[in-house]
Image (tube, helix red, strand yellow):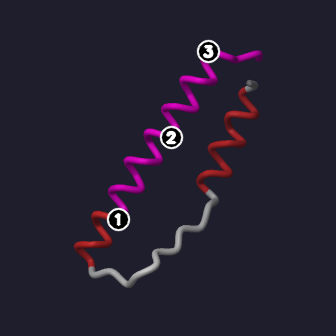
C-alpha cells in the first residue's frame, strides 16, 4: 500500500454522506456524532496499522 492509497481511503471515508433514518433530539445527536467520531478514529487507526505493515513507498 502506498501513502497515496492510504490518503485516498481516508479522503473517501471522510466524504461519505451519513443520513440517519430517524429524527434526533440534541442529546441523541451528540451520542450519534460521538459514536461516529469513535468509529472513524478506530477505522483510521486500522488503516494506518495496515499501511505501516504493508507500505511500499
Q: Tell me the element at label 3.
A: helix
Left or right of 28: which side holds 17? right
- Up-down relation of residue 35 to residue 41 (above or below): below
Which region of the structure is painted magenta? 33-57
Verify whether residue 7 appears in magenta: no
Q: Which residue is mark 3?
A: 53
At 72% from the left and 42% from the top, the residue drawn is 8
Label 1: how many Cα within 10 Å (few below 14, some 14–19, many 20+): some
Place residue 41 in its image quadrant.
top left
Q: Which residue is mark 1?
A: 32
At 27% from the left and 72% from the top, the residue drawn is 28
* Mark toward the start of the polypeptide (2 vs 3): 2
Verify whether residue 49 appears in magenta: yes
* Mark toward the start of the polypeptide (1 vs 3): 1
Dominant secondary structure, magenta: helix
Place residue 34 in its image quadrant.
bottom left
- Up-down relation of residue 21 to residue 50 (above or below): below
Q: Tell me the element at label 1.
A: helix
Relative to the observer, which residue lies in front, 55 or 19?
Answer: 19
At 44% from the left and 39% from the top, the residue drawn is 42
Place residue 50 in its image quadrant.
top right
Residue 38 locus on image (x, y percent): 37, 47
Residue 11 locus on image (x, y percent): 66, 48
For the N terminus, the quadrant is top right
Q: Which residue is mark 2?
A: 43
Label 2: how many Cα within 10 Å (few below 14, some 14–19, many 20+): some
At 68% from the left and 38% from the top, the residue drawn is 7
Image marks 2 and 1: residues in contact by CB distance under 8 Å: no
Give the alpha-carbon distance from disc 2 to disc 1, as whole Å. 16 Å
For the C terminus, the quadrant is top right
Amino acid at each position: 500500500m502506498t501513502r497515496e492509497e492510504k490518503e485516498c481511503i481516508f479522503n473517501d471515508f471522510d466524504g461519505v454522506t451519513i443520513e440517519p433514518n430517524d429524527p434526533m433530539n440534541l442529546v441523541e445527536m451528540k451520542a450519534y456524532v460521538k459514536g461516529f467520531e469513535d468509529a472513524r478514529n478506530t477505522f483510521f487507526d486500522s488503516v494506518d496499522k495496515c499501511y505501516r505493515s504493508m507500505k511500499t513507498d
